[in-house]
Image (cartoon, rainbow, N blue to C red):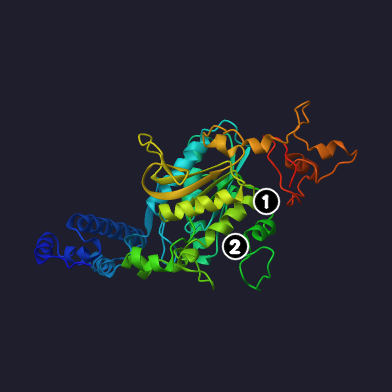
Amino acid sequence: MPRIPTALLRKARTIDAFLPALLAPCRDLHTAQNELRWLREHVEKVAKARRAKRDTLVKGALLGQLVRERAKGKPLQYLLGTEYFGDLEIKCRPGVLIPRQDTAASVTHLAKLVRTAPNLPAELRVLDLCTGTGCIPLLFRHEFTSNRKDFDLRIVGIDISDKSIGLAHYNLLKNERIIQARAGMTNFAKADVLADPFGDLTIGAPLPVRSMLNHNKWAPFWDILISNPPYISPSAYWKTTTRSVRGFEPKLALVPPPKSKFDDRQQGDMFYPRLLKIAEEVEAKIVLLEVADLEQALRVAQLAQKLDVFDGIEIWRDEPDVSSSQPTNEDGFHVYGEGNARSVVCWRSEGGSWLGKSSSPKPPELLQDAPEETSSNSYWPPSYYQSNEVNFNAMPRFMWKRHMGDQRGKPPTRWRTPKTRWREPA
């Protein structure tokens, strides 16, 4: 890091005695002046609260302490205690990742697209994994309900950190104005995204996501899955993050845990296979996963494509709602917006229409063995008509659910959605 010119230090000292110390983390005079102004406003706010409790505060001493901590690299958001995420002011505490505005841009864009969809279910379910401060569920609800109040919106945020869950609950109480929403429409719970629901569980360890949903008697199927997981590789952590991030923000929320036989890149991508598997298990119709850059976005998009469960996959940049920019094509995937690649978006079934996507024609091989549509039952497989009894192995998925009610497990064969014709499993 280059040294600060002596002339700039002299100029800062002539403006305010506290400014030279802030030049180290800010690197320019204008930013340092802004941060000093925010710190002074925070001190005034704290002093006012103390006076209301008939307590006293030496404002100069508190300001000096905050400036010294900021000079050592402590993030401004931890010192002020909050950060804006979209239109919401989110409480921040050490040990929990600070919300970023590029994440807010993707969540806001998604909420605005979905809220204008005409064919939403009566209850829209949103699952946020690695929720941190709870900023993503709260912003999605804020943006969605600002335009649509005719739907029930149920949101659950999940994290492995007790600090995160506690802070998310605090932010929920601070930002939710409707008591009914606090009571049951927005929840946070502890679970381990990487845990195998069919593996051996350690006593005291967090439950896998599916097990946690079952334990809380929450719905097993969700319409939208969002996640901003740890996605920085160990080498990129030292090369691309700032001293402030490395020194004060939780590494657990930035770098996936080490795993034997995983190289540097595989460790950075560790969460995405599991997230896509969970999305498939909960039958999410829209999936939004944040990524570090375009290279990682393409790897995640290709991984989602290999699952062969999504009707479409695209990449959003930092500003996905910039309508003036034409989408580009990277390795066969459309990339929308301006800035760095930030999110991978997948959709299937009616999720495409929620995003305003026109349905694309199915490949010819999907239709080559399809029976002729002679009745309203043409979506049923030929083997169904050869039996007088209901055969769940031969029944389309949507009818299987209707017969099985709430006992909805994973069918033994792979199913097609009701909107596509039947093709016998291989």
Which label's residue is closer to the chain start, 2 or 1? 2
Marks 2 & 1, CB-CB < 8 Å contact = no
Q: Please say if 303 is above or below 54.
A: above
Q: Is residue 76 left or right of residue 346?
A: left
Q: Quadrant of residue 92?
A: bottom left
Q: Is residue 256 left or right of residue 63?
A: right
Q: Secondary structure at mark 1?
A: loop
Residue appearing at x 70%, y 36% in the figure: 418
Q: Residue 306 in the image: x percent, y percent?
A: 58, 51
Point out the image quarter for the N terminus: bottom left
Q: Is residue 140 left or right of residue 235?
A: right
Q: Quadrant of residue 264?
A: bottom left
**Label 2 environment density (alpha carbons within 10 Å; few <14, some 14–19, many ≥20):** many
Residue appearing at x 63%, y 72% in the figure: 204
Q: Please say if 307 is above or below 94.
A: above
Residue 213 visible in the snapshot: yes
Residue appearing at x 39%, y 66% in the figure: 237
Q: Please say if 356 is above or below 22.
A: above
Q: Secondary structure at mark 2?
A: loop
Give the amino acid type for the residue marked by disc 2 in the picture.
Ala
| Picture disc at residue 202 | none
Q: Residue 36 in the image: x percent, y percent?
A: 23, 59
Q: Is residue 334 left or right of residue 364?
A: left
Give the amino acid type for the residue marked by disc 1 in the picture.
Pro
| Picture disc at residue 220 | 1
Q: CA distance from mark 2 to mark 1?
A: 15 Å
Q: Residue 89 in the image: x percent, y percent?
A: 40, 51
Residue appearing at x 75%, y 27% in the figure: 373
